[in-house]
Image (spheres, rainbow, N blue to C red):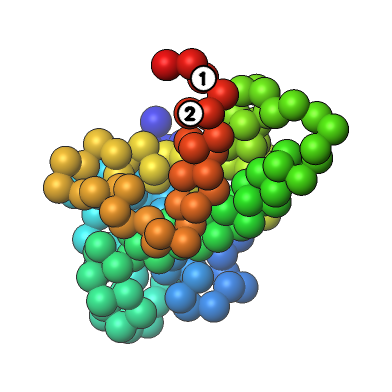
Amino acid sequence: MAKRASAVAEADHRDTEELGTRQRLLLTAERLIAEAGVGQVSMRQIGAEAGARNLSAVLYHFGSLDGVIAAILEYRMAPIERRRSAMLDELVADKTKQITVNDVLNAVVWPLAEQMLTRAGPNHYVGFVAATYRTPRLDSWGAVNPRFRRGLVRSYIILRRLLPN
């Protein structure tokens, strides 16, 4: 298992070598948190694994581990939210079609699935999100910028209208 984790880390490092420092730190932090959990990852470890020459690079770019987490959420949620909002806009705009629960759930889930399936660079987002949910001190919903929650809130409102109870 340790050999496999090392091979994955090595492959991810190769994939991130050409990225800028901030993005390399971000993707490395995402992977480390997905693998070990929030409480097991230090800012120094993120910097070292990302190949940052200055081990305080994480502090410089993000301020704190909470800042790293917020930046990862923003990095991944922005395209997911754009896609989700576009799908909801299409649903609402089509006056000839009655919106179903399935339509709304597709708009909720599919943008995340697309993000995972595109595999444009290393992507440990689902594991990262699972790790943040397992961290009691961390309010995952509160850590997400409100502008990236709009699609989920809209989906909830539409579902409330569609479901009798």
How far from the left and from the top, in percent, is residue 105? 59, 29
In the rendered structure, find residue 2 and report the number of the disc placed on it.
none
Measure the alpha-carbon separation of dots 2 and 1. 5 Å
Residue in the image at 36% along x and 37% along y: 130
Residue 40 visible, this angle: no
In the rendered structure, find residue 160 and report the number of the disc placed on it.
2
Residue in the image at 50% along x and 70% along y: 23
Look at label 1 and name its amino acid.
Leu
How far from the left and from the top, in percent, is residue 27? 47, 60
Quadrant of the image for the C terminus?
top left
Residue 131 quadrant: top left
Residue 103 visible, this angle: yes
In the rendered structure, find residue 163 and report the number of the disc placed on it.
1
Left or right: residue 7 versus residue 116 is left
Label 1 residue SS? loop
Circle 1 residues within 10 Å: few <14, some 14–19, many ≥20: few
Residues 80 and 28: in front is: 80
Look at label 2 and name its amino acid.
Arg
How far from the left and from the top, in percent, is residue 64? 23, 70
Circle 2 residues within 10 Å: few <14, some 14–19, many ≥20: few
Quadrant of the image for the N terminus?
top left
Label 2 residue SS? helix
